[in-house]
Amino acid sequence: MPVHPLWNPYEVPSAEEIDAARVAESARVPEPVVVVPADPAWAQWYDVVRDRVVAALGERVVSIAHVGSTSVPGLPAKPVVDVDLLVPDPADEDSWLPDLEAAGFELRVREPEWEEHRCLRGTEPACNLHVFAPDSRESRRHRMFGAWLRAHPEDRELYASVKQEVAGRGFTDAMLYNNEKAWVIYDLYEKIFAADPEHPHDPHPRPGH
């Protein structure tokens, strides 16, 4: 059966796997998860982050994009901008990390088994800077997800309601919060892939659904 090339099976990381990926103690400090109404200023936050990264890395920036909920107008979100940064080789940290650290970013997560993903935290404005390689499947998934939500208000509202309900449970770990809403993200990707005219995709419902 055909499967979309960007499809991933439904999996959520364990608390132990989440902790093992954290390289900075600051990433283990509890932070209340708060989802707030959409803020038009988030687009300007991204501009600030983009300019800071480009100034630090120059031509080593293969591409950079505003992703995640803050990139979707009208979608409630945590007030932290998500940014995908593609560099030639994320595993070669010496070629890019020192300059980003000098620009005020802190490496918090290292996941080499997941497309060589690294995540840095920036402040003023608050951001998560996700570093991937140029051929990253995940960065393409992120762009498809955001485009779908911008074009489909009913799914945007569904996602918003799930985010707000889960955040209302009082999580103090953003990754555990992410785990609890992973089901709706998976289901939305199934819709996105099924609707993609360029790649056939047979339904792959979550186990038990």
Image: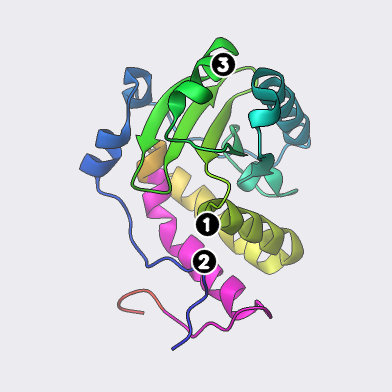
Q: Which mark is residue 6?
A: 2
Residue where numbered disc 3 is placed: 99
Residue 119 in magenta stretch: no
Q: Which mark is residue 11?
A: none
What x and y, as percent, mark residue 151?
A: 75, 64
Indicate whether 114 appears above or below 207.
above
Marks 2/3: CA–CA distance: 31 Å
The image quadrant that residue 88 belongs to is: top right
Segment colored magenta:
177-204
In the rendered structure, are the residues bearing label 2 and label 1 in contact, judged by CB atoms less than 8 Å apart? yes
Q: How many marks?
A: 3
Q: What coloring was used for the rendering? A: rainbow
What residue occupies the far left of the structure in this picture? 16
Q: Which mark is residue 137?
A: 1
What residue occupies the far bottom of the structure in this picture? 1
Q: Residue at x 64, y 17 (%)?
A: 124
Q: Amino acid at mark 2?
A: Leu
In this rendered view, identify the residue nearer to me: 55 or 34: 55
Indicate whether 133 appears above or below 172.
below
In the rendered structure, are the residues bearing label 2 and label 3 in contact, judged by CB atoms less than 8 Å apart? no
Sequence-first tag of 2 and 1: 2
Q: Amino acid at mark 1?
A: Arg
Q: Residue at x 37, y 66 (%)?
A: 10
Q: Amino acid at mark 3?
A: Asp
Other residues around mark 1 within 10 Å, as few (<14) / some (14–19) / many (≥20): some
Helix, strand or loop status at disc 1: helix
Q: Residue at x 58, y 18 (%)?
A: 123
